[in-house]
Image (cartoon, rainbow, N blue to C red):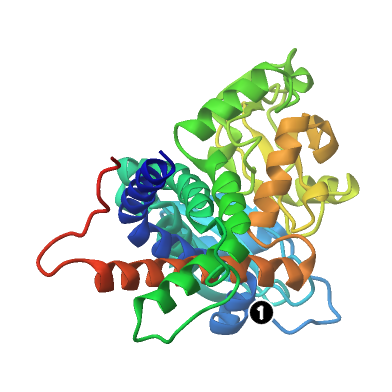
Amino acid sequence: MRDAVYRAVWRWHFYAGLLCLPFLILLSATGAIYLFKDEINATLFAARTVVAAEATAPLSPDRLIFNALETAPDAEAATFTEPADATASAVVTLVEDGRRILVFLNPYTGDVLDRVAADRELMMVVRRLHSLAYFGPVANGVVEVVAGFAIILVATGAYLWWPRGRGGGVVTIRAGPAQRVWWRDLHAVTGLVAGAGLVFLAATGLPWSIVWGAQLRTWSNAAGLGQPRALWADKAVSAVPMGERVSAAGWTMQDAPVPLSRPQDPLVAIGIDRAVAILHGLGMPAGFEVALPAGGTDVYAAAAYPRAVSRQRLISLDQYTGRPLVDVRFSDIGGVGRAIQYGIGLHKGDLWGRANQLAMLAFCLATILLSITAAAMWWKRRPAGRLGVPPWPR
């Protein structure tokens, strides 16, 4: 009976691995790169992301947006992202022929440093590859399946690893690379060390999935454990969700409604300079992104998504009065929403500085090693010209 269970688990482990192996390598490689997005941008793309700090005050947001629009006269300004610190560039997002363009500017001189299509910016490409969204919604859904099977892989792998009275190959690696047992032991010991990390990465990545994640958000909101809907319960709201206005809305708030401005007489908007000044006065964290009003009832929708998860914040300002219509702090979000935001922060290496990045990098590299050793074991074990599926339990 025990042998039959072992063979059944082995078959599950084999098929789950066969399905997941190429995707796990892609997810781990792209995830490892994205962990260091800020460092990569500051090194490879320093010409557009880093500026020399100056004693003079930065130019006004309105002037920077004007300079960005000079590069594309037929475009419209969609968002303004202020510099995160004294040596960071400002970014203006333009919309031209339905396509978003990022314009990087020196905040002190107003010089345009670079222009790049938003969907071709390196870290966006890496992120879309990581979710397989680059290949369409069906491929994006495959990631959800892979995450589920990754958890099955760890559970079945732990069962197969269990010593059952043997001493070798449990926490040590026997023989040499020429023999299959070496690859088996390396696979098992790596899985022992990194299995919990793989489960964590799968679990914290699932909230972004198109089916399970969307259902979790809907349930948490309905239970009062996600979005603080009471904040806009008595307000008129737009049909366009926050996640379509700003890129930094976060998981919990990405489909939250955006309140509407109340038109005044005369219809005179406060302008982006005044809006940014108000946001500073409200204590918005540096480096926030603010979406410009796109119509007469639209708002200045601002979002801050710093590495410190507890400082995440969203504010919507009436475009005529500058009054905050909705101000969502991290503490306003329900328990499930906060837990998921913390999990995502750990997943992305945003918490605890370099230690978090290196820990997640170690799990990514271990997952790649698990995939390589699995392929090597299968190659050495399979009969010539056959798939080498583990036998049926008897």
Indicate the quadrant containing the N terminus: top left, top right, bottom left or bottom right: top left
Q: Which quarter of the picture shows residue 181? A: bottom left
Say what secondary structure mark 1 lies in.
Answer: loop
Q: Is residue 169 left or right of residue 304?
A: left
- To which residue does mark 1 refer? 50
Given residues 375 and 206, the one toward you in this image is 375
The crowd level at tag 1 (other Cα within 10 Å; few <14, some 14-19, many 20+) is many
Q: Is residue 24 above or below residue 338?
A: below
Give the total of numbered labels.
Answer: 1
Q: Could you tell me which residue is drawn at 77 percent across and 50 percent down?
A: 309
The answer to whether any part of residue 97 appears in the image is no
User: Residue 366 location, x and y as percent?
Assistant: 53, 69
Is 211 in front, or is 250? Answer: 211
Asked whether 333 or 104 is in front, the reply is 333
Residue type marked 1: Val
Residue 105 quadrant: bottom right
Extreme residue toward the top, this view: 234
Residue 233: x percent and y percent? 73, 14
Residue furthest left in the image: 385
Q: Is residue 258 above or below residue 71?
A: above
Q: Classify the position of the C terminus by image quarter.
A: top left
- In the picture, measured across the screen, residue 74 lies left or right of residue 341, that is left
* x then y, percent, for residue 323: 82, 31
Instruction: Report x, y in % for residue 60.
Output: 74, 62
Above-or-below relation of 394 to 217:
below
| Residue located at (52% from left, 71% from top) | 169
The residue that appears at 53% across and 39% down in the rendered structure is 244
Quarter where residue 285 is shown = bottom right
One can see residue 11 in this view = yes
Q: Left or right: 49 with respect to 191? A: right
